[in-house]
Image: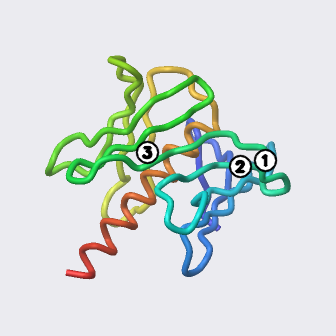
Amino acid sequence: MREVALDGEPFAEVKHRSFSSTVDCNLLNGPVLVFEKTSWGSREFQLRAADDPSTIFCTAERKGFLRIRWELDLTLGAARLESMGFFRSGFLIVSGNDLWGSVDGRGVFKGGWIVTAWNALDPTDFLLIGLVFNQIQRMRSAAAAAG
């Protein structure tokens, strides 16, 4: 289990399932959630209640071919993750023309991610954004390993 902090305070623990893109998320003061693909060939992920698959908190869908972009359905509304640039690993959180924040890795040796937001996001939004960024990093690593 990996601990996830919000404003320096732990608020969730996440655990990746082996050989899968599914992540189990245990909110310390809330429900147990699951981050997973909606179906095998899908590009859509959802953060949902573990005990009730119909209770969906947030969704994310990968868009684009050459330029990776993710469409997000957060508690505050629709947003998207857009790459910060070709030589940058981070992504901007954008809604319409408004910049809501960013997400980037903590560093080569630390692992994990940092979500910086200028709007008051729900903890499930922070969690979804971080998990999508983690998924992007895993896809990049797999592509680099494949050659």
Residue in the picture at 18% in, 43% down: 85
Please say if the residues under marks 2 and 1 sit with CB atoms less than 8 Å apart: yes
Amino acid marked by disc 2: Arg
Mark 3, residue position? 114
Q: Is residue 63 left or right of residue 58?
A: left
Q: Which mark's residue is nearer the viewer, 3 or 2?
A: 2
> Label 2 belongs to which residue?
48
Q: Residues within 10 Å of mark 1 (few under 14, many from 20)?
A: few
Quadrant in the picture for the N terminus: bottom right
Establish if 96 lies above or below 114: above
Residue 47 place in picture, x, y as percent:
64, 49
Asked which quadrant contains residue 39, the reply is bottom right
Q: Position of residue 100 (x, y in %)?
A: 41, 24
Pointer 2 or 1: first along the chain: 2
- Image position, residue 93 (x, y; %): 39, 32
Q: Secondary structure at mark 2?
A: strand
Q: Quadrant of residue 142?
A: bottom left
Most extreme residue toward the left, as rendered? 87
Q: CA distance from mark 3 to mark 2?
A: 22 Å
State the mark number for residue 54: 1
Q: Quadrant of the C terminus?
A: bottom left
Q: Amino acid at mark 3?
A: Ile
Real-space Cα distance between discs 2 and 1?
Answer: 7 Å
> In terms of secondary structure, where does tag 3 sit?
strand
Per the rendering, the mark at residue 131 is: none
Near mark 2 (Cα within 10 A), the count class, few <14, some 14-19 or many ≥20, is many
Q: Quadrant of residue 122?
A: top right
